[in-house]
């Protein structure tokens, strides 16, 4: 049964009338939906990463790759800032140094930053010296509780050694061949332990603050040792027990 012609005319006129009135609303709705996408476009992404261009951070894990997993979380945070990051076991320090030196000589990398935990921190002085011999000086190196006494030589803009003195951590000594700034900071006084120093949010903020100061030219993080926090706060931040400081990898 076909609809009456008058009915068709009424429906058609009704649709045309409201279609015209709804068109501006539809256009406005589309514009509102697209607005956030425009703000997150390539221009903003480029602005976020432009300051990080030329920097590369190398993170060295400790033994077996199972005790330094906090470095993986640190890598995620740095990558969110647009900073290129390589995470590897400390046994690869020599090949990583060769890779970093090649990137530096090519001009693709202009700022080399090293961070190591446990055995990864122990390998940092050797990696700094090798890079210096290869003509690729390290801008910043950060050690997280090396459990062996190490000696530093070669050139490095700044070397910060966070260690747990009441555990198995050791300060870093400098040789006559060392050129740069060395800081030994005992973080055992603020509740850090060997197996948790790489996972602590407090230490992540310190490490990222130092890296950002080099990469983006921001203010340097404060390294003054803070007073011990109440035991409840220490437990809440997942910094472990004092007994964990005696274990090392």
Image: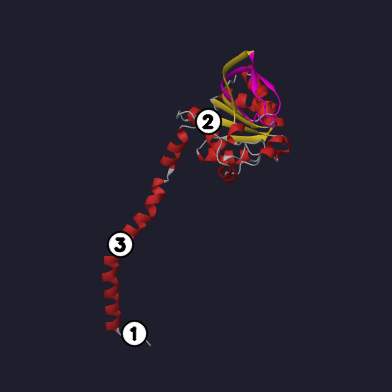
Q: How many marks?
A: 3
> Is 164 part of what is drawn in magenta?
yes
Label 1, residues with CA under 10 Å away: few <14, some 14-19, many ≥20: few
Task: Identify residue for label 2.
Answer: 211
Q: Main secondary structure of the magenta part?
A: strand
The x, y position of residue 70, in whole percent, is 62, 40
Task: Identify residue for label 3.
Answer: 25
Could you tell me if the residues under marks 3 and 2 are in contact, i.e. CB atoms within 8 Å? no
Element marked by disc 1 = loop
Task: Please name the residue shown 30% across and 80% down the image.
Answer: 8
Q: Nearer the viewer, mark 1 or mark 2?
A: 2
The x, y position of residue 103, in whole percent, is 59, 26
> Is 244 part of what is drawn in magenta?
no
Cα–Cα span, label 3 and label 1: 31 Å
**Left or right of residue 112, residue 20 in this image:** left
The x, y position of residue 25, in whole percent, is 30, 62
Task: Identify residue for label 1.
Answer: 3
Element marked by disc 2 = helix
131 or 177, nearer to the observer:
177
Task: Please name the residue shown 36% across and 57% down the image.
Answer: 30
The x, y position of residue 227, in whole percent, is 54, 33
60 or 32, nearer to the observer:
60
**Image quadrant for the C terminus?**
top right
N-term mark: 3 or 2: 3
**Image quadrant for the N terminus?**
bottom left
Q: Which residues are magenta?
A: 147-175
N-term mark: 1 or 2: 1
N-term mark: 3 or 1: 1
């Amino acid at each position: 049964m076909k609809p009456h012609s008058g009915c068709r005319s009424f429906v058609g006129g009704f649709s045309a009338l409201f279609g015209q009135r709804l068109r501006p609303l539809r256009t406005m709705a589309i514009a509102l939906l697209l607005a956030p996408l425009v703000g997150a476009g390539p221009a903003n992404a480029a602005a976020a990463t432009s300051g990080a261009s030329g920097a590369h951070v190398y993170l060295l894990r400790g033994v077996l790759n199972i005790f330094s997993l906090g470095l993986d979380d640190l890598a995620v945070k740095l990558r969110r800032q647009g900073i290129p990051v390589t995470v590897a076991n400390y046994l690869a320090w020599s090949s990583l140094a060769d890779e970093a030196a090649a990137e530096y000589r090519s001009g693709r990398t202009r700022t080399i930053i090293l961070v190591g935990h446990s055995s990864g921190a122990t390998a940092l002085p050797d990696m700094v010296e090798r890079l210096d011999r290869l003509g690729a000086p390290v801008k910043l190196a950060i050690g997280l509780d090396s459990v062996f006494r190490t000696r530093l030589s070669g050139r490095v803009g700044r070397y910060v050694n966070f260690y747990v003195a009441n555990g198995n951590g050791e300060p870093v000594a400098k040789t006559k061949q060392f050129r740069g700034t060395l800081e030994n900071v005992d973080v055992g006084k603020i509740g850090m332990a060997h197996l948790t120093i790489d996972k602590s949010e407090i230490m992540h903020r310190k490490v990222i603050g130092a890296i950002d100061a080099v990469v983006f030219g921001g203010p340097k993080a404060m390294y003054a040792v803070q007073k011990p926090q109440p035991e409840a706060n220490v437990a809440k931040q997942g910094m472990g027990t004092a007994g964990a400081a005696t274990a090392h990898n």
